Structure formats: structure tokens, C-alpha cells
Amino acid sequence: MQDAGQAERERLIARFGKHFSKGDVIFREGDAANEAFLLQEGRVRLVRKVRGIERSLSALRPGELFGETALVDGATRTSSALALTDGTALALDQTTFRRLIETSPSIAARVVQQLVRRLRDAEDQVETMMMRGTQSRIVNALLKLAQANHPGKHACTLAISPLDLATRVGLDVETVRKSVQQLRDGNYLRVVAEQVEIPDMDALTRLHSLLSMKEEIRGGDSSTPPPPAQAER
């Protein structure tokens, strides 16, 4: 017997699904916002032009809502959505979205959880952006993610790509790759595919304290390579 949740998902995709291919522009910044999207399959990147330069805002995964400015009358797109892979999203106008929220408790709960998570992430990103050092930003972002998703754990694994991490800390991907390599060399983390493994949260927390102290003392960039963590036993 088919799972009821899967049957409902297939029904919604058949009715409201919008399929896209890798490289497609789902919507552009400045366009009229007529539909919000609930990502079902694939990856989507949101970008915005700042002083003429395109900046990455976030890389979305299935289950995430985007283009929600369409839920406000007369709104325009504040960012562009680019397809990183082939995929599918539910395309929902205001009326359909409200009806779906009223009739589907699981989707309503998912949307509320996502909005709460976005608020928390926005607060964390403001804190991260206030740090001047490259390493400080990256370590702070990793600690915040670990504490939010794996509270109280001595070690954890985070599903985050270099692009995702670069977006969170406001740096280009290559700078993030180099800094992550320094942290790997210091035994503070390991990288497997698009996952970051933190083997010792205490060691990374101590590094964060050290980098914060260096910023306060120097009043400058603390992006020099960190001292090696104690090797695992």
C-alpha cells in the first residue's frame, strides 16, 4: 500500500509542480512576484546584485520555501533563483498557498519551522558578519550550525558544501576552501563529499575563543592558520 504522505506529495506535484533543469533561471530579481515555491527535488541558489556584483544568498535543499515575497500583494522579486541541478518545486500563488496551509498540517508545520529557522540563522549570520577574521567567521558559523543541529554532542557531522558555507559567512568560495583546508590541517575538522565532520567540539570551541581574543587584541584580521589541535587517539 502506498504511503499516504507520498501519495499526497505526488498529487501536489501533478497539480502544482514546476520542473526545471540545471542552469535554469526560475525567477529574476526585480520581476513581479506571482508565485512562491516549495522545493521538492534538486538544489536552487538564491543570488542578489549588490553594487553591481552578484552575491550568493543561500543554497536551498528540498523542503525549503523560496520566493515568498509573492505572498505579499504587489511585491517584486528581491533576488534571483538559479537551478543548481535538475529538480521540481511546487509553484503556489497566494490563494493556493493559503488553502494548502489550511488543509495540510504537515506543510504548515514545515513552513513555520523553516521561518523560525531562518530567523535564527539571520541572527547567527549578523553575528558572524561582524567578525573581521576569515577563520573567525568560518569557525563561528560551524559552531552555530553544530549547536543548532547537534546540541550537546562531543562530535558531529554537518551537511554543508563550500558554497553553503561561503554564503553563510559572506566570503567567496575559494577563500572558504583555503580556510577549511587550514582547519583540516590542524585536525579541527574533516571534509567528506559535501559534509563537514567535527571530531572534537571542545577543540573547535577553544579555537574560536582564541581567534576572538586575537581579534580583540589586534583589531584586525585573524585569518592566519590556526595551531594544530591535539591529534585523535
Image: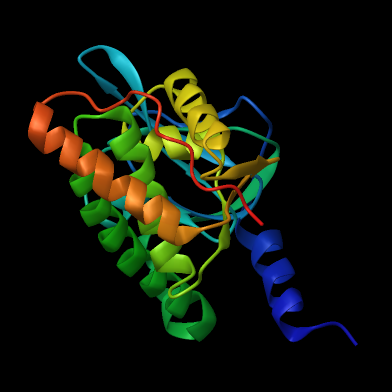
Residue 41 higher or lower than 226, as above or below = below
Q: Residue furthest top?
A: 52
Q: Is residue 11 visible?
A: yes
Instruction: Give the quarter of the figure containing the C terminus.
Output: bottom right
Q: What's the residue at 44%, 75% (across, down)? A: 152
Question: In this rendering, would 93 be left or right of 157?
Answer: left
Q: Position of residue 5 (x, y in %)?
A: 70, 80
Number of residue marks: 0
> 178 or 9: nearer the eye?
178
Q: Position of residue 48 (x, y in %)?
A: 32, 28
> 77 or 152: nearer the eye?
152
Q: What's the residue at 18%, 35% (across, down)? A: 214
Tell me where residue 109 sits by quadrant: bottom left
Q: Residue furthest right?
A: 1
Instruction: Give the quarter of the figure containing the N terminus.
Output: bottom right
Q: Position of residue 158 (x, y in %)?
A: 56, 55
Q: Is residue 74 visible?
A: no
> 56 or 176: nearer the eye?
176
Q: What's the residue at 39%, 35% (across, down)? A: 167
Q: What's the residue at 14%, 24% (across, down)? A: 220
Residue 231 higher or lower than 15, as above or below = above
Q: Position of residue 97 (x, y in %)?
A: 42, 66
Colouring chosen for the image of the structure: rainbow
Question: In this rendering, would 123 be left or right of 9?
Answer: left
